[in-house]
Image (spheres, grey):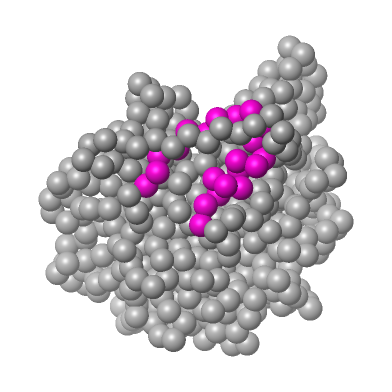
Amino acid sequence: MHLRAVFSGIVITATLVCNDLAAPAVVIYGGPTYNSATKTGYKFGELPYAPGNTAGDGVGVGTVSKYYGSDNYTAVHAVRWDTSGTFIELANLGVDSEGYTGGWAYAVNGAGTAVGASSKYVQDSYRGERAVRWDPSGQVTELGVLGNAATFVDARAYAVNASGTAVGWSENGTTLNERAVRWDASGTTAAELGKLGTDSTGYSISKAYAVNDAGTTVGFAEKYPNPLNTSVGSRAVRWNAGGTAATELGNLGTDQLGTTAGAAYAINNAGTAVGEMAKYTGSSNRGSRAVRWDASGTAATELGNLGTSASGVTQSVAYDVNSAGTAVGYARKYVSGVLYNLYRAVRWASSGSAATELGDLDLSGVGRGFSQALDINDAGVAVGSAEKYDVGGTLVGTRAVAWGSDGVAIDLNTLVDPSSGWQNLTVAVGVSNTGWITGYGTFNPGGGLEPYTRMFLMQIPEPVGLSLLAVFATILPRHRIRVFTGDF
């Protein structure tokens, strides 16, 4: 998902020079810290996406490994951090006799309500990983399961809307299948969402991945169209607000047995959903393709790609969609039927299906490297990561990036004060509608301590017009941004 400009083989470079009167660099609010001298603290942060949205309004949530000395590992903990410069461990559902537990934060809304999962222990008896909701202070509420809560049952909450309604899945306690569920903001009862049949034993799997502010939910369900105990693969599914019936969303063909695979990963408040589905021509699988489903129907609109192999095979996926219906994700890039890039960041406008390749960080202008867009906000700012190459074409690492509506890639590292301790912002995972970005990168605390992976939170201003460059030019002190203007 990246764009570069090559006119008749000539790369056109635009350089912005910021003067000494520019404002300070963007403040990076770091997550939990680690001390390599005492071997205590937190490292190896996890920030989920599709499903999951870890960027709130001035708040980040994630999961991190905790160490208490000599690198003795206690568990993974769900954590919350914000602009105050402090963080909290989100409360759990108990620990075992050695103090071990587990917590995973998957999403947070604008009010600071987070959802995820926590290991549950009752008098040292492990009862599974349960779906939970955390209030802004970090207090935990266990969400209901479909089975007997006094026994072993797993459940996860993947997404939460503005009002606090959460969705995810729970084992059903009978066959221990994972079933899509919804938990209303006013309570904790798990409402099982409809499925697309089961085998003769009652077996099937479904999961809810995203919910909009109206309560409409999307995800996937395995399909069993007959009593022959045979699944014909997974289907993208929509569950309307206030109900539980599963609406099967359209696909891009099946094999000769009627089998295919796909899921919806995101939905906007207008009801437009995006995700991926396998594409079949006849009975031949041509790879998984990015798909959009409009709120008014169920037909699958295949979103454009960046070329295919000689046999018509490629791969793409749409991870997120904003209020305008603009989607982002990635696509493999082929040139004359030959794979040119494994994955490139892509944007799809709401008005059509063509894939727009987003800008890269290849300063040599060849246009190589991996990139992916993971999230987009309503202002049209997308975030993700891209490999960076120097002017000689040598790979120098992976960088967290943002793209404005013009598709130009901005290396977020160029916004950071070099003395801040951040060596490299590696991946940007989520972006809120107020411009708050979560991600992770390498942090060097100095003083002889070892660098480690740390989560970050930062805010970028709203873009001026179509370009983030004009915004960043006012906030970068004495920095030089070198970008490729695109042939859009």
Examine the rendering and report whether any part of residue 1 can be seen: no
Residue 290 lies in the magenta stretch: no
Q: Name the spot of residue 211 as percent of width and height, x first.
A: 59, 72
Point out the stretch of residues depicted in magenta. Answer: 466-486
Who is closer to the viewer here, 20 or 213? 20
Who is closer to the viewer here, 459 or 488? 488
Number of numbered discs present? 0
Residue at the image point whose x is 45% and y is 53% from the top: 406
Q: Is residue 277 above or below residue 56?
A: below
Q: Name the spot of residue 125 as percent of width and height, x first.
A: 76, 52
Residue 400, located in which quarter of the rendered image? top right
Q: Residue furthest top?
A: 448
Q: Name the spot of residue 267 as percent of width and height, x first.
A: 52, 71
- In the picture, the quarter occupied by the C terminus is bottom left
Examine the rendering and report whether any part of residue 311 can be seen: yes
Q: Name the spot of residue 287 as percent of width and height, x first.
A: 26, 57
In this image, 247 relative to 323: left or right? left
Q: Is residue 402 above or below residue 280?
A: above
Who is closer to the viewer here, 380 or 49? 380
Residue at the image point whose x is 47% and y is 43% from the top: 409
In this image, 267 relative to 30: left or right? left
Residue 342, located in which quarter of the rendered image? top left
Who is closer to the viewer here, 161 or 133? 161
Residue at the image point whose x is 77% and y is 13% from the top: 447
Residue 479 lies in the magenta stretch: yes
Residue at the image point whose x is 35% and y is 71% from the top: 352
